[in-house]
Structures are given as structure tokens and as C-alpha cells.
Amino acid sequence: MENKKLGWAIVGLGKFATEQLIPAFKDCKYSELVALVSGSPEKAAQVAAEYGLNTPNIYNYQNYDTLKDNPAVDVIYIVLPNSLHAEFTVRGTQAGKHIMCEKPMATNVADCQKMIEACQQAGKQLMIGYRAQYETYNLKCIELIREGKIGDLKLITSDHGRPLKPDKPEDKWRADKKLAGGGSLMDIGIYSLQACRYLTGEEPVEVSAMMHNTPGDPRFKEVEENITFSLRFPGGVLANCSSSYSFFETKRFQAFGSAGNITLDPATDYNEHYLTLKTEEGTEEIKLKGNNHFAAEIDHFSECILENKTPKTPGKEGLRDVKLMMAIYEAAEKGQPVKV
């Protein structure tokens, strides 16, 4: 496997793909970028020239299905607005390719199930792009909790927020419910939800929530601005989380135990992480050698395909989050807890 690299096609050339994902391939051992799919011929040609890709390996959304005729492409990475994930997953796997899809997996449970079934029927792997689960500092936090460094885990808080700016191309579709499926919860609140799930290692059994949109703010005609939600886990851990499309950029979580606590702030930044462990012995800043978590998740999927193993974050992981987010929206609308 040392010399084997799988060929990847990136679908969607927005800011996230061009500034984070595509540059990450230089640090990959088992993956290489070989094709692009974009609705902008000009942008695709520019990116292809920058990374030395052949012109025949540039596709658009109409001839996307002809990827089936390109043996150089093994994996398709879908980086499109949320409501398009299901369509391009089904079409991609029908073209005979393995699929990696950005989170959230889809905008509803039915589409998630459709994606899983399509990949199963085609005999292809499906993985969801939860980069934080491949990032060094987040993995260290999980390790500290499992090792009992803070005693018995009791409570988690997690907050994610940033201003929504629909005048920018990368945010315009996020204000459109048809494309995004929801607001801050679907986009960044999912990081708070994910953190609670991987820090506890459990699935919540009950959720409650509240939402608020600033009256008259045109950004929030269709999607939610602020949402807070609480989770109850079977082992007794409680979690309080929030996401916002209006307050200053925040990406953090804290885990409180009977003998200490850990704070990761920022927790889900692309590059920066700051981890502290507080116990009776004092407060310690834990410094680690950071990793390129984009390359790590991409290579993980390639390795799983090469070795015929189930990826760490398969389709069912994405399905769980979408089910939980739907329950959070339901709890906020009803004004009462929802069992899950």
C-alpha cells in the first residue's frame, strides 16, 4: 500500500474547497487530486492550472455522471450546498465511485438514508467529512476523558458562532433554507453537537432547545440565527450547547469532571488550538504537534478503501447528527423536551 494513491475528484470549488481541502493533498500519502467538478469553467481552469491537472479531468454538473468513464478517479468528495449532497452522492456512486461528503450529510433524514442505501447497493464506501474527529487536539481531549484525567465526566458546554454575511459568495446560499436546510445549527452548531457525542462516546436520549431571530434582520427570514440546546446522555452527562449566526467568532468546548476540567478554545479552528487541563495539581497548557486534519481524514478514507475497512465517520454517523438536529428543531418549536 506504500506506493498506492487513490485518485480524488472534488465537487464544488467554493472557498472551503480551494483554500482548505485542495491544498491538503500535498500532505496526503494515499490520496491525490486528479479531477474537478465545478459550475464555473473559469474557476475550474484556474485551479486545474495551479495544481497541474489535465483539462479532460475538468467536469461540470451536467456531465458529472461521465466520471464513470474515468478510471483515474476512485473517490468523489462532495463540497456543495447541503441540499445537493444527496443528489450528487447518488449520482456519484452510480458512476462507480466511493463517496466522501461534507457535513451536514443532508438536510433531512430521508436523504441521508437514500445516500446510505445508494452506496450499499453500488458496493461503495461512504464517509462524512467530520474533520475534528481526525484532529490532534480533539483526539487528545477524548483520550484525557477516557483515561479519567478529569475524573467522572459530568457536564459539557460547547459554543460555536460567527456572523452570517450573505453578501459574500460563501455565505449567500447559507441564508437560503432550500439550499442550507437550516441556519446556524446545520452549519456550525453541528460542531457543538459532534463534540458532545465524541467526548462522551454516547448518544443522547433527550434534547431540549430554544431559538431566536432578531426581528427585522433580513439575514434570518428563512434560517435561524441563534439556537441553544441541551442534551441528556444515558450515562448521566448533561450538555449545554449553542450556535449563532450573529455573535463574534467562537469555536470552543469545555468538559467538566469530578476531578478536573478541560477547555479547548479554539476547538474547531482550521489551524489554531489551545488546550488546558485543570486539576487539583494546577492548570496545565497541553501543547501538541498539530496535524493537517484535512489530509488526515482524506487519507483515512483512502486507507479504508484500500484495506476494505469501514471508515471512522461513515454515513450512519452523519445520519445520527441529522436525526438529532431534527429533534433539536422540534424541541425548539414545541417548547418542550424531545426523546430521541
Image: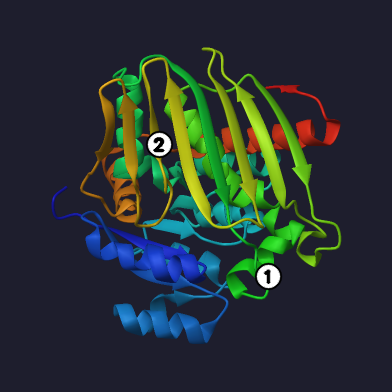
Q: Of 318 and 7, which appears nearest the observer?
A: 318
The relative height of residue 145 versus residue 19 in the rendered view (above or below) is above
Q: Residue 308's x, y, as percent?
A: 31, 37
SS for dot 1: loop
Instruction: Determine whether, in the image, residue 99 is placed left or right of residue 4.
Output: right
Is residue 108 at all visible to an observer of this figure? no
Q: Is residue 132 above or below residue 35?
A: above
Label 2 packing within 10 angstroms: few (<14), some (14-19), many (20+): many
Which residue in the structure is indicated by mark 1?
A: 166
Q: CA distance from mark 2 to mark 1?
A: 32 Å
Q: Residue 327 at what x, y percent from top left?
A: 72, 32
Between 281 and 24, the one lying in front of the other is 281
Which residue is under mark 2? 263
Q: Position of residue 57 (x, y in %)?
A: 40, 75
Residue in the foreground of this view, choosing between 152 and 328: 152
Task: Report whether residue 147 is seen.
Answer: yes
Given contact means CB atoms under 8 Å apart, are the residues at marks 2 and 1 in contact? no
Identify residue type, mark 1: Pro
Q: Nearer the viewer, residue 334 or 86?
A: 334
Q: Residue flagged by tag 2: what amino acid is it?
A: Thr
Q: Quadrant of residue 166?
A: bottom right
Viewer-side label of 2, 1: 2
Whole-percent x, y for residue 296 in the image: 30, 49
Which class describes the residues within 10 Å of circle 1: few (<14), some (14-19), or many (20+)? Answer: some
Mark 2 vs 1, N-terminal side: 1
Q: Is residue 65 left or right of residue 152?
A: right
Looking at the image, the residue that sits furthest to the left is 2
At 23% from the left and 44% from the top, the residue drawn is 287
